[in-house]
Amino acid sequence: EDQVTQSPEALRLQEGESSSLNCSYTVSGLRGLFWYRQDPGKGPEFLFTLYSAGEEKEKERLKATLTKKESFLHITAPKPEDSATYLCSVDAGGTSYGKLTFGQGTILTVHP
Amino acid sequence: DAGVIQSPRHEVTEMGQEVTLRCKPISGHDYLFWYRQTMMRGLELLIYFNNNVPIDDSGMPEDRFSAKMPNASFSTLKIQPSEPRDSAVYFCASSFSSGYTFGSGTRLTVV
């Protein structure tokens, strides 16, 4: 069974204090790993897709990286508007093609 | 592009009543997904369609839940009869090749 575990469950940072969120996964075969951001009362918003170990993607203060067992979402010099829940998910491909399994998320709070 | 459109945004119903949630996917997307989100269980996939055909409904909790996609631009998720434990936020998402686009969700409260 595909599993996704995110840590920590919650993270509090001061504005400008860089940190990383972790996503560990267990799948029979990885077609893609996806990061989403979710604000309260809204649907998840797509951030990145990573397909193979060693791949990196960047967007503003966020950088996502991928190894064979985990992914990291690095946040550099965060701002209060980066506060949200960050969700990691995997598409195992094969007979599960297109189906995403989500982790529980990391709640990020950035204080000014 | 208006994105994935869900209706209603909020639904409050009494136990035993029928509830129908609606979704309009993004034009051209060939996959449509229904998810349920709760604090305890996070995001759970209920069912998904490819080209209007149900592919995997193993996440549908029980026979009280049913979903249809009569055409490429419309899908419904029906709960009959509803129970308090069905209270959650229900999301519809659509995709083409990779990366989902989610709707804003329907917050269902069953009292």
Image (tube, coloured by chain):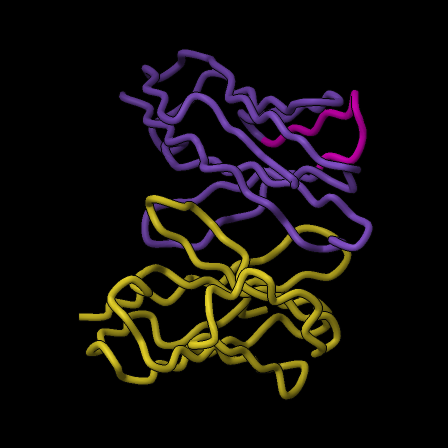
Chain colours: A purple, B yellow
Task: Pick the residue in front: B85 or A23.
Answer: B85
Q: Position of residue A52 (x, y in %)?
A: 81, 30
Q: Which residues are magenta?
A: A50-59
Return the x and y of residue B65 as percentages of the image width and height. 46, 75
Task: From this view, report whether residue B78 is shown above or below residue B43.
Answer: below
Which residue ends up furthest to the bottom in the rendered image?
A: B70
Q: How many marks?
A: 0
Quadrant where the C terminus of chain A sits is: top left
Tell me: A44 left or right of A95.
left
In the image, B14 versus A36, the foreground residue is B14
Which image quadrant: the N terminus of chain A? top right
In the displayed structure, would residue A24 be above or below residue B22?
above
Residue at 27%, 84% (x, y): give it: B17
* Residue A110 in magenta stretch: no
The residue shown at (39%, 54%) is A42
Of the pair B19 and A42, the residue shown nearer to us: B19
Instruction: Establish if A53 lies above or below B47.
Output: above
Question: Left of B44 or right of it: where is A95?
Answer: right
